[in-house]
Amino acid sequence: MTGALPYVDTHLHLSRWWRDIKATGYRPDIDYTLKGLLHEMDAAGIGHAVLIQVNDAPNVWDGLAEARGIVADSAGRLRLVSTVDPTKGAEAVAAQIALWEKTPELAGIKLFPGYNPFYPHDRRLDPVYEYAHRRKIPILIHTGDTMDNWGLVKYTRPIEIDEVAVRFRDVPIVLCHFGNPWIDEAAELVYKNPNVYADISGLLAHPSYPLFDRMIDLCRKRVLEGILMIGSAERVLNGSDWPLIDLKVQVGLVNSLDLPPRDRAAILGGNARRLFGLPEASPVRTGSS
């Protein structure tokens, strides 16, 4: 990475509440600690990453406290994204916003429709979108397939976000997972709405899948088609969904896209640095492996 801007990963998780890391992690012996994550970031040339508070914590307050601690110990490498569940009621949403007011390092808010039974355009979320507008931070929204088969994908279609994007034009919105399997639908939303982005995280199955190499080929094709539908790579973000995806594999996927080098560089870091206000350089240790 000497002489080049380090990469950015806009979608990863680290939490003691992550379930069955040996089975769900991209390899069974993954070092699922902050030290392990930073080592893998260095090896993949990733300078900064966005840490998304998981949806599996016993409550959002404990989850936020855990995530804040991890970010504080990351020596400036990680940025904090918190979450909220509108189905808990207006008082719970207001309480979470009050906590965010006391969290100066908050870099974004993640919503988990599908994992929780709500649509992104649920009016109970209006205070959250309004808060993001005041704070000038993006809203990240889960779209597409859910990791768990008890999730309800009727809530996760990208089209359900169009109304929100129109009503809150000044709020940047990130479609996590590029709407997979509805990538063309997600691409339409990015094309239509100048405040909508898409990350390309979590698009691959577990590496133990016998046809994993062919899946990478298909993923490369589908992501490229989505970008061509948008007509620009300036609102497409690199993301891995680590620990589900190997950081090196994700970076390799982006670098293999049949796009001009400037577009691959934008996806791998430039777009994220603008969206999250990240510095142009970060402490990637050369020679990592």
Image (cartoon, rainbow, N blue to C red):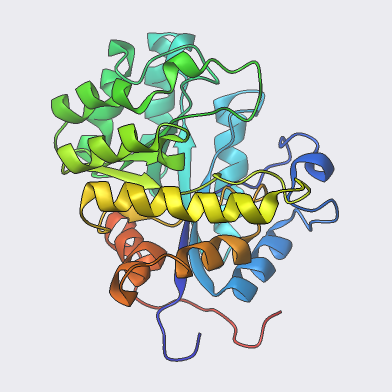
Residue drawn at x 71%, y 37% as measured from the top left: 18
Residue drawn at x 55%, y 57% as measured from the top left: 72
Residue 219 in picture, x, y percent from top left: 51, 50
Q: Is residue 243 above or below residue 161?
A: below
Q: Is residue 243 above or below residue 150?
A: below
The answer, for residue 51, to whether it is visible in the render is yes
Residue drawn at x 31%, y 20% as measured from the top left: 160
Q: Nearer the viewer, residue 252 or 287?
A: 252
Q: How many numbered badges does the structure rendering display?
A: 0
Residue 25 in picture, x, y percent from top left: 74, 47
Residue 255 in picture, x, y percent from top left: 47, 70
**Image quadrant in which you'd find residue 41:** bottom right
Residue 280 in picture, x, y percent from top left: 34, 75
Task: Determine the residue located farthest toward the bottom in the rendered image.
Answer: 3
Left or right: 270 with respect to 200? left
Left or right: 128 with respect to 77? left
Q: Nearer the viewer, residue 40 or 182?
A: 182
Q: Is residue 42 above or below residue 113?
A: below
Left or right: 249 with respect to 206? left
Residue drawn at x 57%, y 47% as measured from the top left: 241
The answer, for residue 102, to whether it is visible in the render is no
Q: Quadrant for the C terminus, please.
A: bottom right
Q: Nearer the viewer, residue 124 or 63?
A: 124
Left or right: 169 with respect to 259? left
